[in-house]
Amino acid sequence: MVWLLFTLCALTAIAIWLRRRAQRQRARERLSSASLAGARASIANASGAPEGSLARWLFLAGYRSPDATSKFWQATAALGAIGAVIGGSLHLSDALAPVVSNLEAIPGRVGLLFVPVVVAIPVLLPLGFAAFPTTKVRRARRARVAQLLRDLYPSLELFASLAQAGLAFDAALARVLTTISADRPLGRELMTFQAEVLGGAERSSSFRRLAQRVGLPQMSSFTSALIRAHEVGIGLASTLRRQADDLRAELREQALARAQALPARLVFPLVLCFLPGIFVMSLGPAFYGFLVETSGFGSTR
């Protein structure tokens, strides 16, 4: 009962703190939008990535709502509280005691290795539940990066081919956008870049914000080369072709590295799944015969 009351008090305190934090954040946003400089900073942050580490991480993973940070903390606190309630209930009800007794009764005292894990379940449950939003965001970020890299190379090849055919960058961009679905992350980012340029924004700043929104070294290299070509006056076709060739070579090296790392990755499932069965099938009869032959060793007749 004391554990349950403590959990409810902690949950209430966390909810109050999150609510006050959201109120202070909204007040700061209203205060910053009251002046011209604050309005410009707000527009810049809306076009690029947020400045905070957590907000930027959520932004790059695709969670771009204004209250994404507060929702992340609320989900983490709520799931941690649920895990704490479940763990406290297991601890207070002694539901794990029969499991511990069965483990201790295993011959050879092998089950004692798993007793600390079972005893620590009431503590591990809140941590596991609280880590679920972080795991979900990390999975979303990896999926987004995979989609961006999958679409970036064909887009660069198409950019280079269109530039070599004599099209300007804006015309090539419009042509590329017709081949990329608006539901894809790269398509949305390029459409945002096109809207910024058509709205009168400076091209170099739009390129930098595009690199910040994508958050990939390949895109940063691509935008840096385009900014340099735009400022210095280098030929666009040669720049785009060089970027496409570099990205092709990098993707080839990554594929070779994954292929070379495959045997090392297969060691764990091989040792865990195949070798025990092989040992049982090959050495099991021999050990059984040895134990049968030596079962009467040391006995008096």
Image (cartoon, helix red, strand yellow):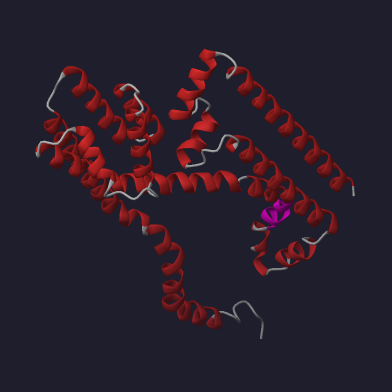
Q: Is residue 28 left or right of residue 181?
A: right
Q: Is residue 83 above or below residue 57?
A: below
Residue 240 placement (x, y as % from top left):
17, 34
Q: Is residue 260 left or right of residue 5?
A: left
In this rendered view, identify the residue nearer to me: 247 or 27.
27
| Residue 227 visible | yes
User: Which residue is situated farthest in the left direction here?
Assistant: 165
Q: Residue at x 66, y 63 (%)?
A: 111
Residue 42 placement (x, y as % from top left):
51, 23
| Dominant secondary-structure state across the stretch colored magenta | helix
Residue 45 placement (x, y as % from top left):
48, 25
Q: Residue at x 31, y 30 (%)?
A: 220
Residue 212 placement (x, y as % from top left):
39, 30
| Residues drawn in magenta | 115-122
| Magenta-span inclusion, residue 117 | yes
Q: Is residue 277 left or right of residue 236?
A: right
| Residue 49 visible | no
User: Which residue is situated farthest in the bottom direction here?
Assistant: 301
Q: Is residue 3 above or below residue 225?
A: below
Q: Residue at x 63, y 22 (%)?
A: 30
In this rendered view, identify the residue nearer to me: 30 or 161.
30
Residue 127's quadrant in the figure? top right
